[in-house]
Amino acid sequence: MAFRIIHLGISSEHDMIAVRQRAREISAMLGFGIQDQVRIATAVSELARTVFTHAAGGDVEFSLDHLGEGASLLVAIRGTGGVNSGSGMDEALAAALVSAERLMDQCNVDIDNGRGQVVRLRKTLPAESIPTTATLLGIADSVMRSPISSTFNEVTLQNRELLDTLAELRSRQEDLLVLTQELEDTNRGVVALYAEIEEKAERLRQADVHKDEFLATLAHELRNPLAPIRNAVEIMRRTPLHDSAVHAKAQHIISRQVDHLARLVDDLLDVARISKGKITLQRQPTALETFINLAVETAQPFIELRQHRLHVKLPGEPLQVLGDPARLAQIVGNLLNNAAKYTASGGQIDLVAERLPQGKLRIVVRDNGIGLSSERIKTVFTLFAQGETAPDRAQDGLGIGLSLVQRLVSLHEGEIRVESAGRGKGSSFIVDLPLLDDLGAGAAAAPSATPVLTSAEAFSPMPTSDTEASAKTSVKILLVDDNFDSVTMTAMLLESFGHTTATAQDSVSALKEAKRMLPDLVLLDIGLPGVNGYEVARMLRREPTLHATRLIAVTGYGTDADKQKAVDAGFDQHLVKPVDLEALMRAVDTCQKIST
């Protein structure tokens, strides 16, 4: 049920002024704010003018939909005989309705009891306005008593309202501009935050990948030396004490592999200490030749094993730096080992030292190895990061050597950088250290001679012991491993059980030896240089004469994924280094049963 406030007729221009004035007065008395008063007056007057112009007059009725809380102002606008089509009415009414819909809460065109169309407008009263019957009577009485303004006054009032509205719009526009700027700043901040979060997430993902790769590599690198050590111990246990030559060979291999393990552990501990700031340098005046010769002596066995040519060029004058002799030798030694690892067998390595005009010492380690791409140069000093190895060298090391070098150089107030013309064009690692100006009268001169590289020790297979020879059928076994100590000790151990062995250290020699020997069993390492063990296994499986040969993967990688790769490549069994003697002999026994 609607509660009527006032009913107004529309038959003249003066009535149009009255409709707008009454709409403003009624809305004010109902508690609407200035802006809403203007909106209601504008919507009602525009529709009333449309009716007056195109329907030859009409009427406007103001009412409330109900009394009390949540009431709404209702305005019904009718033309004479209803709002009808024709004479441009449809277009004019459509335009007025579009405007009214923006100004009011609701705007509808309905059929009014057969009298034609009626436009109904609705605007919800402010929450604090709770109209009563007395309120409606007071509004109606006040409106009826209020005189209608002249046309001039109404136009003046409308202009003032328009100016006030324009001022408010400008104020809101300014507020919107401020808000827009704040939103843009916030958006830039959010975008930057998301970019930072994404960058950190990517770094975490990369760190997680590096961690997994490092743990797998660490397990592999720690297991590799254990295999020849275990086999050497077993040989010593099975060999009579008077056979000193065999014991000496086994002891030499144990010593060499223990040294390798010690270097791995030392590198890990050094990185941990430096990262926590717990490493202490024993700094003292140190002659250049002292730590250079120590570094060359340390790296010499590996350089010699790789059959590289090493050229050392030192300045003719005695030079000193204030540093830790052992750590300085470690810096140069690691760079030499790195050059040897990433250069194909028979390559050239140059170690050059010179005085710079700025009172600095420059040490350059240059090789003609596989080189570095521009992307790899950016990450070459990253912890646990490893690049491609030389084509004749399997992946090895923990990926911490260059990172450790960089940190040690920094502790000596020095700088290190790397240069490379690209892949296959070699690399140069350049270290700059501050020189010690005052050499002192009693400065000790280190020996100037560079150590001469010696040949790698060769081992011959241990002769089979008659008392220890297996009574079972001798098995022909081919051992393939690029670790010389490991393949030598394992071969000696198997021969002590009466088996026939042959060895190979890469894919080419492995295939050649397999075709010649036609072995019953192949113990095949996975991490071979050039072509890995998986591919070698596939090649062996394609040889018709080797269909009966049993293939066993012997590797430092022992995850379920690694074992599945071995199965897919055609291996019959997967053993993890260091292989237990019983497990190894059970594998050999399996071949004996098959062959018999």
Image: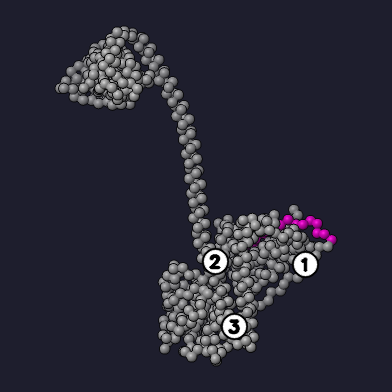
Which of the 4 image quadrants contains residue 54?
A: top left
Q: Residues within 10 Å of mark 1 (few under 14, many from 20)?
A: some
Q: Are marks 1 and 3 in contact (CB under 8 Å)?
A: no
Work out whether 248 lies above or below 423: below
Q: Amino acid at mark 1?
A: Ala
Residue bounds of the magenta highlight: 427-441
Cα distance between the residues tagged 2 and 3: 28 Å
Q: Residue furthest right?
A: 441
- Choose the circle earlier in sequence order: 1 or 3: 3
Measure the alpha-carbon separation of dots 1 and 3.
Answer: 40 Å
Q: Residue at x 45, y 84 (%)?
A: 589
Of the numbered discs 1 and 2, the one sitting upstream in the chain is 2
Taking the spot 63% from the left edge, 78% from the top edge, the residue there is 252
Q: Nearer the viewer, residue 193 or 376?
A: 193
Per the image, label 1 sits on a secondary structure element best described as loop
Mark 2 is on which residue type?
Leu
- SS at mark 2? helix
Q: How many marks?
A: 3
As drawn, the label of residue 369 is none
Q: CA distance from mark 1 to mark 2?
A: 37 Å
Residue that numbered label 2 is attached to: 218
Callout 3, which amino acid? Met
